[in-house]
Amino acid sequence: MNILFFGPNGSGKGTQGAILKDKYKTPHIESGAIFRDAISKGTELGKKAKAYIDKGDLVPDEITIPMILDRLKEADCKKGWLLDGFPRNRNQAVKLDEALKKAGMALDIVVEIILDREIAKNRIMGRRLCVNDNNHPNNIFIDAIKPDGDKCRVCGGSLKTRSDDQDESAIGKRHDIYYDTKTGTLASAYYFKDLAAKGGKMKYIELDGKPGVKAVTDELVSKL
Ligand code: AMP
């Protein structure tokens, strides 16, 4: 299964993505996580990406597109992949589509979580990351996934915040990019939505992101 996952920052994309990853046993390829890992290891890629990420800007396409297309060629992606955080603009969507066609690969499922900008912003500011596993959901503003005191509700691990999660202007910029239907992330989602509407086997699934995590998961599972 080759899957793309769209949703604004704060829509629960990581949580729902993890469910798909487990169901289809695909690697979960998260562009943001690749950058954060590179930054923490102090690699060249990390050094180049950090300034953009701290400001809430996109890392330039010249860096991001080859990084992701190379990642999809690795051995663990042979049987499928779940891509999350990429494509983030229309150009990345076009380049991904071209690269897939060239490699004789097809997209099977595209998921879009639909959520209001204001709700998404509040959710981001409440998000806490577990030091043991990024996929452990913790959010101080969402009752269903409230941390256990200051510890991870899943494993009891310590929690931290992402610096770009607490910066309103950076969140605003990330959402400007996401909600831009002309050249931004929604434009890239709609690029694939248009392709799906033209026929073929690709399934485009829209999910309402407003209800709690479990309800969104149920909707997702029912539509797969
Ligand atoms: P995320 O974890 O998806 O919120 O990504 C964190 C940051 O990494 C973003 O705000 C961007 O600066 C950068 N980033 C992640 N994915 C991409 C992408 N596809 N293109 C450009 N920059 C990206």
Image (cartoon, rainbow, N blue to C red):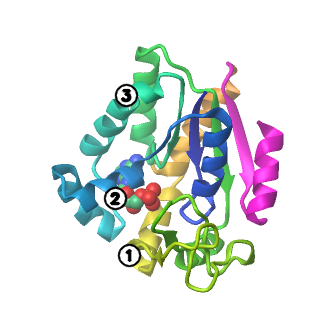
Locate residue 223: give its quadrant: top right
Q: Secondary structure at mark 3?
A: loop
| In the image, residue 95 above or below residue 141 | above
- In reply to whether residue 102 is colored magenta, the answer given is no
In this figure, which residue is indicated by the disc labeled 3? 74
Q: Secondary structure at mark 1?
A: helix
Spatial CA span between label 1 and label 2: 11 Å
In this figure, which residue is indicated by the disc labeled 2? 36
Highlighted magenta segment, given as a residue range: 200-224
Choose between 69 and 89: the one closer to the eye: 69
100 relative position to 18: left or right: left
- In reply to whether residue 206 is colored magenta, the answer given is yes
Locate residue 63: give its quadrant: top left
Q: Amino acid at mark 1?
A: Ser
Specify few, some or many for label 3: CA neighbours under 10 Å numbering under 14, 14-19, or 20 or more: few
61 relative position to 91: left or right: left
Query: Sequence-wise, which precedes: disc 2 or disc 3?
Result: 2
Query: Sequence-wise, which precedes: disc 1 or disc 3?
Result: 3
In this figure, which residue is indicated by the disc labeled 1? 163
Q: What x and y, as percent, mark residue 120?
A: 61, 69
Query: Sequence-wise, which precedes: disc 1 or disc 2?
Result: 2
In the image, what residue occupies the spot 73% across and 78% down?
A: 143
Choose between 210 and 151: the one closer to the eye: 151
